[in-house]
Image: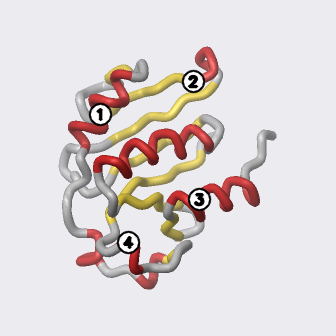
Amino acid sequence: MGYDFMFMRVREKTKRSFPLDSSLITESDCEGQLPWSEFRTWLLSIGGKENGGRDSIWVDYADGMESINFNGGGNDASTIYLDVHAHWARIVEAFSQLELLDPDAVIFDLQTGEFHNLSTFRIFIAENYCDG
C-alpha cells in the first residue's frame, strides 16, 4: 500500500518553523513553479521511465521491489505528487536534489496535513516509518 506526499514551495521557508500545519499556510505562500523540467531530467538520469506521459516518471529502487511515481509539470507546476511504494529514505534522496534546484521546496504529507523541511522529515521518518 502506498503513502502519498507532495513536493511544494513555501515562500520564505527559512523564516518558518517546521513541521508546519497546513492551516498556517495561505495559497499565496505557495505561489511559483517548481523546477519540474530539471528535476525530471535528474529522475531520468537515475533510471526513471516515463509512465503514461512526460509529466509522470516512475522510478524503481531495490531491484524493482520499491518504487515512486513522480507527477509534476502539467496543469499544476507548483506541485510534484509522489505515489510512494518505497522506503521514505528514497524521498529524502529525491527531495535533496529538488531542494538544490529550489531552496523553497518543502515536503507536504497528504495524510497529516503537515509541511516538512528536510530536518523535520527525517525525524518524521524515524518516528513513523514502518516496514510492515
The answer to whether mark 1 and mark 2 are in CB contact below 8 A is no
Label number found at residue 40: 1
Q: Is residue 96 above or below residue 119?
A: above
Q: Quadrant of the C terminus?
A: top right
Lower sequence index among marks 3 and 2: 2
Q: Quadrant of residue 123?
A: bottom right
The local crowd at label 1, few if under 14, some if 14 to 19, many if 20 or more residues have their Cα within 10 Å, is: many
Q: Of circles 4 and 1, which is in front? A: 4
Q: Which residue is mark 4?
A: 13
Residue 42 in the image, given as x and y percentages of width and height: 33, 30
Q: Is residue 118 left or right of residue 123?
A: left
Lower sequence index among marks 4 and 1: 4
Q: Quadrant of the N terminus?
A: top right
The answer to whether mark 4 and mark 2 are in CB contact below 8 A is no
* C-alpha gap between disc 1 and disc 2: 16 Å
Name which residue lies at 29% across and 48% down: 101
Q: Is residue 33 left or right of residue 92?
A: left
Regarding mark 2 in the picture, which secondary structure is present there?
strand
The three-letter amino acid code for the residue at tag 1 is Arg
Residue 76 in the image, given as x and y percentages of width and height: 23, 54
Name which residue lies at 51% across and 40% down: 93
* C-alpha gap between disc 1 and disc 3: 22 Å
Residue 75 in the image, given as x and y percentages of width and height: 18, 50
Regarding mark 1 in the picture, which secondary structure is present there?
helix
Name which residue lies at 54% across and 46% down: 92
Q: Which residue is mark 3?
A: 121
Q: Which residue is mark 2?
A: 61
The three-letter amino acid code for the residue at tag 4 is Lys
The local crowd at label 4, few if under 14, some if 14 to 19, many if 20 or more residues have their Cα within 10 Å, is: some
The three-letter amino acid code for the residue at tag 3 is Phe
